[in-house]
Image (cartoon, helix red, strand yellow):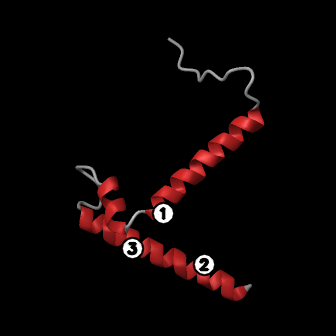
Amino acid sequence: MSYDLYVPPTVRRDEAIRTAASALLDAVAERAARTPREAAQAAFYPGHPLGSVEAIEAEIIRRRECEAAETAASLAAA
């Protein structure tokens, strides 16, 4: 059984790359639009290394604050 992805011959490589990039950007935007609690609930699974939804939520908040500080610092430097 072959697991190769079938791509119709009419789809050009550059078009496929644009479509994949667009889907990735949509997913990133959807993820960023979630509240930290919603994101933590979506990320949690039994055995998660952080152990609980609350711990995941705290990590998401920490990362978002770091990203915001880095963005502010790069804008201030520009």
Viewer-closest of 7 and 54: 7
Residue 36 relative to residue 8: left or right = left
Ranked by sequence position, the earlier of labels 2 and 3 is 3
Ranked by sequence position, the earlier of labels 2 and 1 is 1
Q: Amino acid at mark 1?
A: Ala
Which image quadrant: the C terminus?
bottom right
Residue farthest along the top direction in this orientation: 1
Question: What residue lies at 22% left-to-right and 49% top-to-bottom?
Answer: 46
Question: What residue lies at 66% left-to-right and 81% top-to-bottom?
Answer: 74
Name the secondary structure under disc 3.
helix
The residue singled out by tag 3 in the image is 61
The residue singled out by tag 2 in the image is 71
Percent position of residue 51, x then y = 24, 60
Name the secondary structure under disc 1.
helix
Question: With respect to residue 48, does 11 lie above or below?
Answer: above
Question: With respect to residue 75, does 9 lie above or below?
Answer: above
Question: What residue lies at 54% left-to-right and 82% top-to-bottom?
Answer: 69
Percent position of residue 73, x then y = 62, 85
Percent position of residue 21, x then y = 65, 47
Sort mark 2 into few (<14), some (14-19) or many (20+) by Cα contacts within 10 Å.
few
Give the number of the disc on residue 32: 1
Residue 30 relative to residue 61: left or right = right
